[in-house]
Amino acid sequence: MGMLIFQVSRIVASGQPLLPGIYKIPVRLSDDSDCVSTIFLPGIDSTKPDSPLVSVDVLVMEQNLSLSEPGRAVTTILADLKRAGSGAAPVDSSSENVGALITAYLTLLRYECAETPPKDNFWIVQRELRREGADICFDGSAFLVGSSEKIVKGSREPLSTNLVSRFDVLNDRDGLLIDRGALKKKSVFIIGLGSIGSVLASDLARCGVGSFAIADSERLEWGNVVRHAAGLSDVGRLKTRIVRDLILDRNPKAGVLEIPLGLESASLGTYGRTIESADVVICATDNRVSRLLCNRMCVKHHKKVIFGGLTRGAYGGMVFQFRPPETMCYHCFVTGFPEAAADRETDESEYGGGPDGHLALDIAPITNLMSKLVIVELQKQTGLVPNGLDTDLSAPWYIWINRREGEYVELTPLGDVSGGLKILQWKPVPMEKIEECPHCGVVAG
Ligand SMILES: [Zn+2]
């Protein structure tokens, strides 16, 4: 059976009452028309006059609905749906449909709740209704129940219905989709939207971070796709635009500032202002010049910044965090460990990960730790950090090794530190601040 995914907010905005009537809502069809969806990615034009439509018949039921006896509630609902459906207009009989393609009919019943139902009862009723192809969701103080049919060669066939509540309901009542916590007031600035930055943006949106600035001047290329959060359908688009859509697709209420500029002298003003207003900065660029520029601005604005990268060939990676004023800055790090801080651009041609090409898996630990450090810092700023986690994750430098090769095993600058490295384990490296640093040192201060 095909499926209709219906977003209640497509009929009526958050906070507005749902009124009875017949609504024509633009839909998106999957290629084989198996799935009819009213969920659109932000930025996709859904208002063309020839858009396919779903016809929604909203009925406000007179009797309240009680879920205290789930079996009885299901029987009542199915009987009401059947009665409502039998009164629906026949296919294409309405002259107002001329010129528009009706692909599906949805019957939506609104019941006031007779009482606040136990959550378990709600899930039981929903499970039983879904077995019949219908669905139920909360809408403020009411329940919405829906069932749908699609039009195939002039006749109707049942569709499996999936109702998506209005976002305010999800936020305020269930908190199922988007974190309600203090993180929604926090902002991050992600510089570089490649294999690390794109995944971080998606991770942090899922964690409930409310405000993003994202910067990259490049467009997605074919060769990026195996390690990027976006897929082939996004090739050729600006990375800022792609990542904005990824964020909003996770959290439609997030704020996103796109900066399609590289970090260079001409854009320093824009970058400086954005760094100043961010709560945490993430530097995920692939060259040392931009990382040092970013470092200098973060020192100037006393801003926490997290750097992350892979070794050439992705046999390992590292995460470096600068917490002003107590830890060393990235300039200190480059001065002390020039090899470890070298450029890390990695592409498939130089990836030595074997025939399986599991580059994305070798990147995942790096993005995961960076996301964790960002979240812990944001929680710390709101005073809600989990028990001692900020102390546990306070090392300035973390090293990760995916397999036994390359500089992390062989290089001498790491000294006895490398002795503690193990495959697939993070190694925190304590480091003293360099007092003579021209940026963060005592002299500079
Ligand atoms: Zn420094």
Image (tube, rainbow, N blue to C red):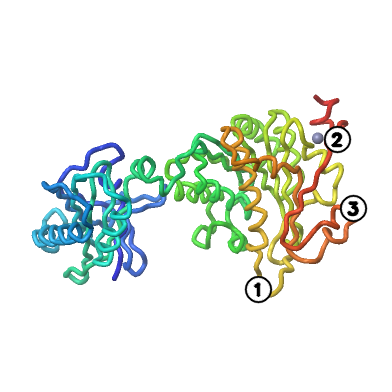
Q: Give the spatial CA distance, label 2 vs label 3.
A: 18 Å
Q: Amino acid at mark 3?
A: Gly
Residues packed near mark 3 inside 10 Å, few (<14), some (14 to 19) or many (20 plus): few
Toward the viewer: 136 or 247? 136
Mark 2 residue crowding within 10 angstroms, few (<14) / some (14–19) / many (20+)? some
43 or 89: which is nearer to us?
89
Q: Which residue was labeled with disc 2?
A: 434
**In terms of image quarters, where does ligand 1 lie?**
top right
- Ligand 1 within 8 Å of disc 2? The answer is yes
Amino acid tagged 1: Asp
The residue lying toward the viewer, choosing from 349 and 416, is: 416
Q: Quadrant of the C terminus?
A: top right
Q: Earlier in the sequence, mark 1 or mark 2?
A: 1
Name which residue lies at 55% across and 46% down.
Answer: 204
* 216 left or right of 145 in image: right
Residue of label 1: 356
Q: Residue at x 22, y 70 (%)?
A: 152
Mark earlier in primary sequence (2, 3): 3
Image point 50% across, 49% down: which residue? 206
Looking at the rendered structure, the secondary structure element under dot 2 is: loop
Residue 415: image tag: 3
Marks 1 and 2 in Cβ contact (< 8 Å): no
Q: Nearer the viewer, mark 2 or mark 3?
A: 3
Nearest the viewer among 140 and 37 is: 140
